[in-house]
Structures are given as C-alpha cells and as structure tokens.
C-alpha cells in the first residue's frame, strides 16, 4: 500500500544514500537508481489511482502553493490595494494591480495562511463581506481603466459567522455575481486550490474558468454533504466521489474551460513548473479574449451563464 | 431519461380538491380551528395569529386578484447529471417530491394580476426538496424574468428555500450566476423586481437572486441569511444571538427594506408596484 507518506519516506531514504554515495565510502549509484525508479513507479501508480477524496486532500495540502506564490511567480510589480472603503480590510481576499507579461491587470485572490498566526489573520482563506466588497471595488476599478481581471480562487467558502451575516454576506456575494456578469473588461478565473461554493463563485464569474489539475470546485464540501445528506460526517470519500468536484469531472461536465496539469504528486512538488504552466495558459486565454470586441465578449459571457444547467424538456 | 412521467401535474391551477377533514388543530395554541376559515384568512390561526405553512399554490392565491393566475412555467423537469445517490437516488427523490406536491419542480411561474397590476410571479414551494435551487428552478426564474421583459411587467419572486440543490452539484451552484445574469437584463430594461423573502430564504438563493430585488420585502416570521445556525456552530462554534437571521435581524442590519405581516402582503405589493405603473 503506497501512500504519500511512504513516498516521502522513500524519498528521504534515497537522499540519505546520495549523501553516503558522495562520501565515496561505498558505490551506491546502482542502488540509488533502482530506488528512484521504484519511487517514480509508486508515485505514478498512487496518483493514477487517486480517489476524488484524496484529490480534495491534495487541494488542501498545507504545502500547496497559495495565491501570493502564484502572484510572485507569474506577475511582476504586485501592488496591493487594501480595504472595502466601508468597514475594513479582509486579509483572506487580496486585491491589487500587477503586470502580466508587461501589461497592467487587476488581481483578485483568496489567500490562505501558512502558520496558525497567519491563518488567524486570514481566516483560513474564508472571506467576509468586506472581502467581497473590496473585490467588487477592484472590479469597478478594472473596468474604469480597462484592465483585465484575473481571479485566483482558493477558499473553503465564505466565512460563516455572526459578523458575516450582520454585514449581509449573501447580499455581498449576490452583488458580485451581478457585477461580474456585466464587467466590461476581459476576465479569467482560476481555481488554484479549493473552490468552495458561493464564496468561490463570488469572484469566479468570468469569460474563462480554469482549474489546476488537483483543484476542486463544489457547491458544498464533502464533509458538509456527508453531514447533511448522509447524516454521517465520516462518509467524505463517498460524498467527494458523488459531488463530481475534481477538475477532470468538471471538464467532462463542460462547466470549465481547461485543466492545467500539475507535476506528479501535486503543485507543491514543483511550484515553478506549476506556475509556468498556469502562466502559459493564462497568456493564451487572455490573448484570445482581449482580441474580441467587448460587446461580443459580454454576449458570450452572458450566453455561457444563461445556458448553464441540465434539465429535461417535455414535449407538447 | 426524463424523470417526470405524468404530465397532468404540469400546469398548475388553483382549483381545490374537497378536503375530508373540516377541522385542524393549531400547533401553536392547541385550539381546534375550522379549516375553511383558516384558508380564507391566508392560513393564519384565527385564535392566536400563528402563520401556518403555505404551499406555493396557497401563496399565489393569497397574493393575487381572484382568478388572475395563469401558469406560464417552462415544461421542464430535473435531470440527474451526476447520477447522485445519497440515502436514495436523486431521480427517486424528485419523483417522491412530485408525488407529494403535485408540482413538476420547486417553483411555479405565472402571469397574474396584483391590485389590478399585471405582473410575472414566481413562487417557490418549500415542500419540494426544501425549495432548493437546481437547474430547473434557475431556468424557471430566468424564464420568468424574460417573460416580464417581453410583457413589460414587473417581476415578483416569493422565495422559500434552503439554498442550492446539492444533488445537482456544480450545476446548482452556477444557477446563482445564471439568475443574476438575467436579473441584470431586467434592470437594463428598467423593469422593477420585487423580492419577497419568506420562511426560509437562505444559502444560495439568499446569496443570489433573492438579494437582488429593487425592493426586498420580508414576510413577518421569515428566516433570512446565508449560513444557517447549525453550519456556524459546526464550523466556528460561535455563540449566536436568539434573533439570529430573523426578519427583524435582517431589517436592523440593512439586508431588507421592510417586514410585512402576511395578511398585509397583497396590499403591500399593490402599493409598491403602483409606483412603477403610469397613471397610479
Ligand atoms: Zn393558534
């Protein structure tokens, strides 16, 4: 039974042998080669047979690159803009200007924390109304100056709590949906980790919607679905499989445009490679949609959302 | 495969079947009350004023000018895009809801007249899988708004929903964006959208179309909000006040325009709609 921990142990073992090999005490190169081959095989097998629930865990992996890592790798001159101008500055949702391939863009991104301290500040990437209103401010800003908008989505969901309700989290999400559908600039949304429900969609209505290979996008978390529908929190594997929340499923369902491949083992195994694959895809999509007249772009965005859904029409 | 088998449920009419039980007991005050009287008073207990639950049909009847309702819903029924099975298969769940309610889906769209003003009216039925919004409800709401545009009428939506239809996965989530998109068209046409929130208006419905009304009216006793009490207590274990997500909580915090008693709702709608109709 190979799981990720076994792989990590084996990897550490190989590293150890390499050290010994360097000291020239023993000739270990053939043994190292053998183990490396085995490691590669195990890894390929593990990720080929990965369940949807395991992919959810990969999407939430603590070493997974977060929005600021991608901003750092893909864009230059990130210039953060703080505050919703109403009540606060949500650290779970960042907005700002940046240059992408030399061209100014507006970035809207959900950011998780690495440390307990940072997560306290960033609410584990769960934005509150002030975050969604800051995002809306950034959208209006982008429209005013004709900058494209790139959203990086990574959230378990909007922050559930008394404060959120008092400030009308539902209304804030709804307003964003309305704003994004009519935003007169090219827009791209990428789910880089977790695409949690309305909290993700509230920055995710766009001309192009992309997912990283191990990202997820769902109306509810597998834990939530297990608790509500199966009345058993432990049935997350079943719930994850049933929700069709992984990138390959969503591509099959034709609700997203492209899946960006990640290195074997997940984005955290090679941050630069993942970011450069994403950057190439973003450039290609941005070039395509930037070349369209804005009325045509708005019309196809409208049609995309107007037509979404699966239902059966009765005759007569 | 179509889930929906029997077409006769399809067009809703407001004629009532005779009821064998002439009396019912009010759960709030325990009094035995005459059903006919309850029916004639918008399902309010004549003794204690308790609001009894309203089906979509009863709600429509309580709001419109007599005999003015015509069902203009799209002839559509749910599909099962994810082959979803929880405690039972989704198609079975749909069929049971159809049997229990006599409705094709969780919302009825119709043309009607309220205080002599023609409107397009959408009314959700909570009995149908918690009034949850899946592809059918999303499409019906959009169809209703497009009908309103075609007829140059106001659009009135009465919500009663627990949120997204989880069994339709991502498709249910995306109905939030879909309904918001068509709502934008209604606004561009400068046609009024009156959103009426009743018990409950929550989750994905509250976080999309229901919160986008030009005027938002809550029925007294409504529950309004995004994340339910249980979700909050399970995730962040925060203490919540007694009035959490009540109608008055929503009013106090600026989520809605007004709170109105059930018996006044029809007149209230006539009143507000009048501002948008020439010559009133
Ligand atoms: Zn009573």
Image: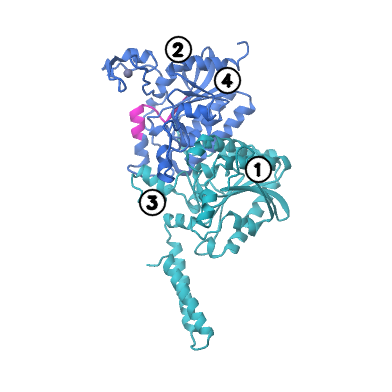
A269 is higher (above) or lower (below) than B29: below
Q: Which residue is mark 4?
A: B153
Residue A189 is covered by the magenta coloring? no
The colour scheme used here is by chain
Q: Residue at x 36, y 15 (%)?
A: B39
Q: Are marks 2 and 4 in contact (CB under 8 Å)?
A: no
Q: Find the distance from the CA under tag 3 to the CA under tag 2.
A: 50 Å
Q: Which chain is cyan?
A: A
* Number of other residues with Cα within 10 Å of mark 1, as a class: few under 14, some 14 to 19, many 20 or more: many
Q: Position of residue B145 (x, y in %)?
A: 55, 27
Mark 4 crowdedness (10 Å alpha carbons): few <14, some 14-19, many ≥20 = many
The nearer-to-camera label among 3 and 1 is 1
Chain B, colour shown? blue
The boundaries of the magenta stretch are: B95-109
Mark whose residue sits in front, 1 or 2? 1
Residue B202 makes an appearance in the image: yes
Side of B73 where A239 appears, left or right: left
Measure how far apart labels 1 and 2 are at the Cα level: 49 Å
Q: Find disc 2 in the rendering and name its residue.
A: B66
**Residue on which disc 3 sits:** A236
Local SS, label 3: helix
Nearest the viewer among A315 and A80 is A80
Do tags 1 and 4 sit on the same chain?
Answer: no
Mark sitting earlier along the chain (2/4): 2
Q: Secondary structure at mark 1?
A: helix
Are the residues flagged by discs 3 and 1 from a single subunit? yes
């Amino acid at each position: 039974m190979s799981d990720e921990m076994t792989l990590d142990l084996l990897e550490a073992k190989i590293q150890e042998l390499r050290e010994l090999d360097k000291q020239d005490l023993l000739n270990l190169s053939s043994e190292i080669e053998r183990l490396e081959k085995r490691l590669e095989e195990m890894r390929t097998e593990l990720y080929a047979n990965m369940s949807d629930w395991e992919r959810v865990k990969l999407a939430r992996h603590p070493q997974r690159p977060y929005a600021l890592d991608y901003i750092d790798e893909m864009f230059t001159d990130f210039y953060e803009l703080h505050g919703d101008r109403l009540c606060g500055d949500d650290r779970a949702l960042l907005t700002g200007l940046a240059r992408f391939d030399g061209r100014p863009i507006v970035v809207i991104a959900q950011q998780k924390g690495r440390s307990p301290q940072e997560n306290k500040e960033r609410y584990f990437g769960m934005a509150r109304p002030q975050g969604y209103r800051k995002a809306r401010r950034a959208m209006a800003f982008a429209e005013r100056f004709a900058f494209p908008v790139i959203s990086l989505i990574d959230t378990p969901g909007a922050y559930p709590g008394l404060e959120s309700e008092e400030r009308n989290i539902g209304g804030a999400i709804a307003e964003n949906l309305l704003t994004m559908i009519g935003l007169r600039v090219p827009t791209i949304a990428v789910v880089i980790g977790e695409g949690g429900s309305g909290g993700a969609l509230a920055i995710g209505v766009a001309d192009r919607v992309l997912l990283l290979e191990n990202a997820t996008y769902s109306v509810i978390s597998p834990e939530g679905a297990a608790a509500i529908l199966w009345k058993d929190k432990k049935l997350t594997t079943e719930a994850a499989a049933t929700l069709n929340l992984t990138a390959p499923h969503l591509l099959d369902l034709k609700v997203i445009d492209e899946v960006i491949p990640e290195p074997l083992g997940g984005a955290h195994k090679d941050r630069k490679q993942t970011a450069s694959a994403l950057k190439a895809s973003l450039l290609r999509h941005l070039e395509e949609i930037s070349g369209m007249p804005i009325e045509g772009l708005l019309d196809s965005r409208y049609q995309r959302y107007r037509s979404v859904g699966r239902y059966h029409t009765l005759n007569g | 495969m179509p889930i929906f088998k029997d077409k006769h449920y399809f067009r809703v009419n407001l004629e009532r079947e005779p009821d064998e039980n002439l009396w019912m007991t009010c759960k709030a005050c325990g009094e035995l009350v005459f059903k006919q009287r309850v029916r004639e008073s918008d399902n309010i207990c004549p003794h204690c004023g308790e609001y009894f639950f309203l089906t979509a049909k009863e709600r429509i009847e309580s709001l419109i000018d007599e005999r003015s309702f015509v069902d203009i819903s799209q002839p559509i029924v749910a599909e099962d895009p994810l082959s979803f099975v929880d405690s039972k298969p989704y198609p079975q769940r749909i069929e049971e809801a159809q049997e229990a309610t006599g409705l094709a889906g969780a919302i009825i769209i119709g043309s009607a007249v309220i205080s002599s003003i023609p409107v397009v009216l959408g009314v959700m039925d909570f009995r149908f899988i918690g009034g949850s919004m899946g592809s059918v409800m999303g499409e019906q709401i959009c169809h209703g708004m497009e009908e309103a545009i075609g007829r140059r009428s106001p659009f009135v939506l009465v919500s009663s929903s627990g949120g997204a239809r989880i069994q339709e996965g991502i498709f249910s989530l995306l109905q939030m964006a879909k309904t918001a998109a068509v709502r934008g068209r209604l606004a561009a046409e400068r046609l009024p959208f009156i959103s009426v929130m009743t018990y409950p208006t929550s989750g994905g419905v509250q976080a999309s179309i229901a919160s986008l009304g030009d005027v938002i009216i809550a029925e007294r006793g409504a529950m309004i909000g995004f994340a339910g009490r249980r979700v909050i207590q399970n995730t962040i274990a925060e203490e919540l006040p007694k009035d959490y997500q009540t109608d008055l909580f929503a009013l106090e915090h600026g989520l809605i325009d007004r709170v109105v008693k059930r018996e006044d709702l029809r007149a209230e709608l006539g009143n507000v709609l009048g501002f948008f109709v020439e010559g009133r």
